[in-house]
Amino acid sequence: MSELGSVYPESGETPAGPEHLNIRRSPWGDRLINLRQAALDLVTRTNADQVLNEASNPDALNKETGIEITAELKRFMDMAKLEAIDERGLSVDYKNLQTSPAYREYQQSCTPRLRYFDPGKITSREEKLAFWINLYNALVMDGVISNEITQTVGASSLGLLAFFHKTAYNVGGQRMSCDDIEHGVLRGNQGHPMLPGAQFSSSDPRLAWVIDPQEVRVHFALNCASRSCPPIQVYTVENLDSQLDMAARNFVNADLEVDPDRGEVNLSAIFNWFKGDFGGHQGVIDFLIEHLPQDDRRKTWLLEHRGTLRFVYKPYDWGLNSTILH
């Protein structure tokens, strides 16, 4: 495998991937995606080899299995949770994490091995979800530290666009940015909600890693280093469903507000950006009802007024989720 495979190939057969992904070759669609990505690279000054994980000796690392690499990633997240993340998972002591043995080991041992690891070796849906969720959250924390961010991930001249496009690892020879993991792999290649086209073109080798159908609860498992983001947790294969369910329930329960006098529901902008993932307006209502406590008065009100209520989306606080824990 090349050091960095072609991320935006112009030709070739559609790579193997989930059979139900049903990707069709579309020359115009692929051209749009490739042009969009080239434009993003240009305006954010991103090179194809611009990644956070250093190269290592491939001869000693090319036999990684999904179990080994996911276990090491989980171990780092467990140690980060213990040493630098508060009990609620809302705040990170980035300064403490940066100087911790756990972070040094993660940089020196785990992230170089990602270069020679084929995520296609991960077979079960639960293993894939746990791996990519944990990797996304680890990558964001690594990006905050590596880019010396102190106020917000949107602090650059190009704002949020730059951070989530530029912050990336080499995984299996392919450049995987935060956006690639979230919108390409975890959201079933739906693409960025603010940009045209799917995340990956029909001939992109990373299609083989796409998780489809998507798991909508991942929206409450991914932490983008901002105050309005869901808490950071460490996800495991054995408890994945219950963890995702708890993450969704806790987020909805803490975030949702109803205003009966105005007939309004105040909720996170996440439900606006990704409304289509939830099945549109009524799908969002169904999701909220399902994930509120059974005896919650908000659930009753939603059931009674689901045909007339209006959504009001809260401003998203992109301030860095940083704290000094010691």
Image (spheres, rainbow, N blue to C red):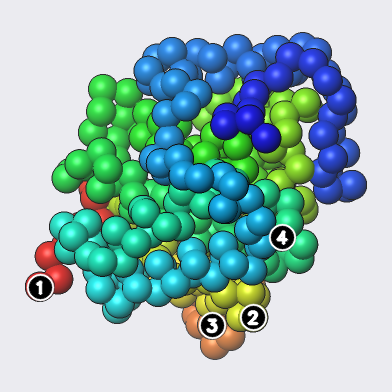
The kind of secondary structure element at disc 4 is loop
Q: Nearer the viewer, mark 4 or mark 3?
A: 4
Closer to the chain start, of discs 4 and 3, is 4
Q: Position of residue 233 (x, y in %)?
A: 43, 70
Residue tagged 2? 238
Closer to the chain start, of discs 3 and 2, is 2
**Mark 3 residue crowding within 10 angstroms, few (<14) / some (14–19) / many (20+):** some
**Alpha carbon separation for disc pair 4 and 3:** 35 Å
**Mark 2 residue crowding within 10 angstroms, few (<14) / some (14–19) / many (20+):** few
**Alpha carbon separation for disc pair 3 and 2:** 24 Å
**Alpha carbon separation for disc pair 3 and 1:** 35 Å
Tell me if residue 173 comes above or below residue 290 in the rendering. above
Q: Position of residue 175 (x, y in %)?
A: 54, 34
For the residues bearing labels 4 and 1, Cβ distance under 8 angstroms: no
Residue tagged 3? 293
Quadrant housing the C terminus:
bottom left
Q: What residue type is disc 1 on?
A: His
Quadrant housing the N terminus:
top right
For the residues bearing labels 1 and 2, Cβ distance under 8 angstroms: no
**Alpha carbon separation for disc pair 4 and 1:** 38 Å
**Alpha carbon separation for disc pair 2 and 4:** 15 Å
Residue tagged 1? 326
Residue 220 visible within the image: no
Residue tagged 4? 122
Q: Residue at x 37, y 18 (%)?
A: 45
